[in-house]
Amino acid sequence: MSVHITSPAFKENAKKALADAPLQSALSKVGPGFIGRRTAAAGLLPEFDALRDSARDIKNHTLAHLDLYLERYETKVRAAGGHVHFAVDAAEARDIVTDICRRLGAKTVTKGKSMVSEEIGLNDHLAACGIEPVETDLGEYLIQIRGEAPSHIIAPAIHLNKDQVEADFRRVHAHLPPERNLSEPTALLAEARGELRQRFLQADVGITGANFLVAETGTSIIVTNEGNGDLTQTLPKAHIVLASLEKLVPTLEDVSQLLRVLARSATGQEMSVYTTFSTGPRRPEDVDGPGEYHVVILDNGRSGMLAGQLREMLRCIRCGACMNHCPVYHAVGGHAYGWVYPGPMGAVLTPSIIGIEKGANLPNASTFCGRCEEVCPVRIPLPKLMRHWREKEFERHLTPAPQRFGLGVWSFFARRGWLYRPATRLAMWGLSRLGWRAGRFSTLPLAGGWTRHRDFPAPEGDTFQAQWHARKAKRGQE
Amino acid sequence: MSSPSEKRPPSVGLFVTCLVDTIRPGIGFAAAQLLAQAGCEVDVPRQTCCGQPAFNSGDRITTRALAEQTIAAFETFDYVVVPSGSCAGMIKTHYPELFVGEPDWMPRVARFCAKVHELMAFLVDVRGLRAVAARYDGTVTYHDSCSGLRELGVHDQPRLLLQSVEGLELREMADADVCCGFGGTFCVKYPDISGAIVEKKAANVIASGADTLLAGDLGCLMNMAGKLQRMGREVAVRHVAEVLAGTGTAPAIGMARREGGT
Ligand code: SF4
């Protein structure tokens, strides 16, 4: 069992998204909000670009010595009384988590925001095992009660508007007085808080993600704006950290550098509101904390990326800036991508996890405008990595047949200039004769994709090369 | 505009791009004229395409063949100038990737790529052009095409030259640096998404109140012109070189040939 994949139906998903008025109104706020705040925050820090270089270098260094740092990290976690579990794939990770829950007789688990949990389809699995998962991040809570997946890696419910949330709260919190006023966002927040408070106290196990795992100290770190992560991990009997293996960082000093670019890139904050460091279970002298501390480190295809051309993707610190700046994401939102990770980072990461056969649309659905790479805090060359997937797709003959055929015909001519020039002259002559009166075409055979949404200009007439050489000959230079 | 110390004018091979060659040769002539004004000796060797459509479709073999073809045709010139940020970016920043690990090719490709420039960047940064002798009566807004902007840093150069055009008022639109949704083959592979992106661009163009939209890439221009015309908007869409060369009176992109420009 794993999260339902609709990436092969990306085009249909996109079409639906484009026709979804509430979604479009929610998406129209993504760009202006995030982009303006990031630009302002970056502008206030003169060394921001230098910090990005250093963030890139820290991650590159870690990836180059990942085995070493994993080992050191594990030793440190053990020394602090915690446990480290390595999971090769999603199924293994789910089993590790449910085993711990069962051993502790857990009925409910509270969860902080974790994309790895989404990646391994943990909630459905826990529910199937009779354990109730309760999302405690407000955005995650919203999509959980709606039965949806996140549409953004840091703002999971960004596709929703306030009216939808109000309707869901009235539906799900049926025990509360129906006449209550929920017109203000603060009222919604207060209601969610009230509901979640009891759940925190009931929970047997708390599961969080991790933004960083620190090899030097065996610490896991999460950054949040709601503080829900703290209650999730300190109140229950056990705290389970879910993290993919690229979350590893050598030292606390490195973390402090990465934190400086993370929040600025993500939300334009200098720092997230809460940055929580967890090292091992509760010690005798601690006033609170979990009795057990487990870290599940997920591979799920990543060690393969480490050895191949997609290694740079493992620098990702999940800030979301690439999707916040992506014109395609702005147009269709996160759900259209059809799996856990949307936007440019998803277009690179998703095919390595679900396979290029299912994920091929994602790296193709990019204009290569380059804005994602321009803002990525760890300077991942996202367009280049998407192109890598297109190459793999082409090499393996997975490119859709009409596209491959079109490319084949074009390349046949383009590689033979002596054929290309007369052929284009003839074609342009024909088109310009047909279109000279209107100056453009509103429909053209074989160009339906173009003319569905815009006109196509009629060519001026003869090709530039033919005209140039005719003029040159006239001047007697040839 | 050639510097006095030069003995002979530099030779420039004009790589017009396949779109300009076939759809709007006037841009090629405008570019040649501007290059001549900047003191260059211009010629147009036989050419087809830089290979970008193949490169972005994952077809490395065709890309490589077209790269070799282009290099062979242009490497004898002092400079290679391209009236498109996207094709210039393809050659200048991506050709080297195609020859990695081939010591026979790498120095030759590096020498070649160092000579390749986008037209606006070449005129201003290499030739030191600061003004042109042209007139254009209109309010124009300028769209920054993605590759030119992000791969080659083309942003200030066209604006600087436009400011010297008599009668022209430059009015910036919102999000001038956001993609227009063309994306080469993207616009036909994902027509609905491309259509939605260009719709936002067209709205920004219209909101600027400009009567003319300029950019440095014919692909983007065709996309934006086609959308504006489908929406029934009377915005004249032209390549920036046409206005700078003083040929901005020819019918705008997608406009009828006989009746003249809007
Ligand atoms: S790819 Fe870069 S910009 Fe995108 S989420 Fe990862 S770190 Fe952030």
Image: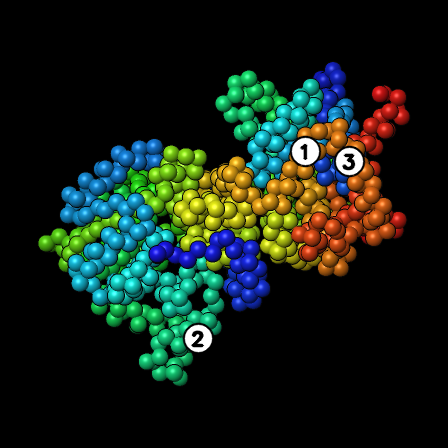
With respect to residue A231, does A70 lie above or below? Answer: above
Chain at tag 3: A
Q: Which residue is mark 2?
A: A167
Q: Nearer the viewer, mark 3 or mark 2?
A: 3
Left or right of residue A202, residue B130 in this image: right
Labels 1 and 2 within one chain: yes
Residue that numbered label 3 is attached to: A423
Secondary structure state at the residue bearing disc 1:
helix
Q: Residue at x 75, y 51 (%)?
A: A444
Of the residues shown, which amino acid type is indicated by label 1? Phe
Q: Residue farthest to the top?
A: B7
- How many residues crowd mark 1 within 10 Å: few (<14), some (14–19), many (20+)? some
Q: Horizontal and vertical percent for residue A308?
A: 41, 34
Q: Residue at x 56, y 67 (%)?
A: A21
Q: Nearer the viewer, residue A383 or A148?
A: A148
Under mark 3, the amino acid is Ala
Q: Are marks 3 and 2 in contact (CB under 8 Å)?
A: no
- Marks 1/2: CA–CA distance: 58 Å
